[in-house]
Image: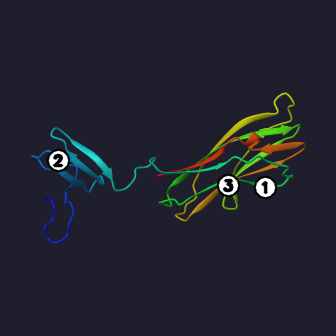
Amino acid sequence: MAISSNGVAGLRTGVCTSSTRPSGPYEGQMIYETDTDMVAVWNGTAWRYIAATTATSGTVLQVVQGTLSTQIGGAGSSYSDTGLAATITPKSTSSKILVTISFAWYHTNGKGDVNIVRGATQIAETNPVGVDASNPSGFCSMTYLDSPSTTSATTYKVQYRTSGGGFYFAHASRTNTIVLQEIAG
């Protein structure tokens, strides 16, 4: 059937399974397959899937980004927030969140640690710099695949600390990023 005439406007597709598709389809005919959870259209020579009602595992469902361009320095031996953060609301509790951060740093004969936090929980930590006077600045990236098991808004943030000397996060006002990608589970 094409457009419904029973007072409800909309396109009505045929419902079948992948093994019971129409034997003589016409070009443009649409079907919904109950066994694959997919919508397909006959293009004149083959059935072509056009949409899935449920995302397949590994599909990127959404991407959120946060940025920071202000240099931060002088943190003590305890972790402090950098201001680099982003919030994502997962569509499913089975989704994973791929967290990627990229940041510039600078040190004055010091050492710094960087932490990725979900809410108040540390989920990843790195030590991007050591005491090395010949290499006082650089750029670092971190990636972590998280399983938050929630459909509530979830904030990820970056923290840092120093241990000896000075360590500066987001050096020279370069743009530093946190990217959150929801991956269907």
N-term-proximal mark, 2 vs 3: 2
Task: Reply above or below: 6 against 180.
Answer: below
Q: Amino acid at mark 1?
A: Ser
How far apart are the two marked residues, 2 and 3, measured between alpha carbons? 48 Å
| Image coordinates for residue 45, horizontal then vertical, percent | 16, 38
| Image coordinates for residue 136, horizontal then vertical, percent | 82, 33
Q: Is residue 150 left or right of residue 78?
A: left
Classed neighbour count for the residue bearing mark 1: other residues with Cα under 10 Å, few (<14), some (14–19), many (≥20):
some
Question: SS for tag 3?
Answer: strand
Q: Is residue 55 left or right of residue 114?
A: left
How far apart are the two marked residues, 2 and 1, measured between alpha carbons? 58 Å
N-term-proximal mark, 2 vs 1: 2
In the orientation shown, which residue stands out farthest toward the left? 24
Q: Which mark is residue 28?
A: 2
| Image coordinates for residue 60, horizontal then vertical, percent | 47, 48
N-term-proximal mark, 3 vs 1: 1
Q: Which residue is mark 1?
A: 80
Q: Amino acid at mark 2?
A: Gly
| Image coordinates for residue 24, horizontal then vertical, percent | 9, 46
Q: Is residue 91 left or right of residue 163?
A: left
Q: Which residue is mark 3?
A: 157
Q: Quadrant of residue 11?
A: bottom left
Q: Quadrant of residue 104?
A: top right
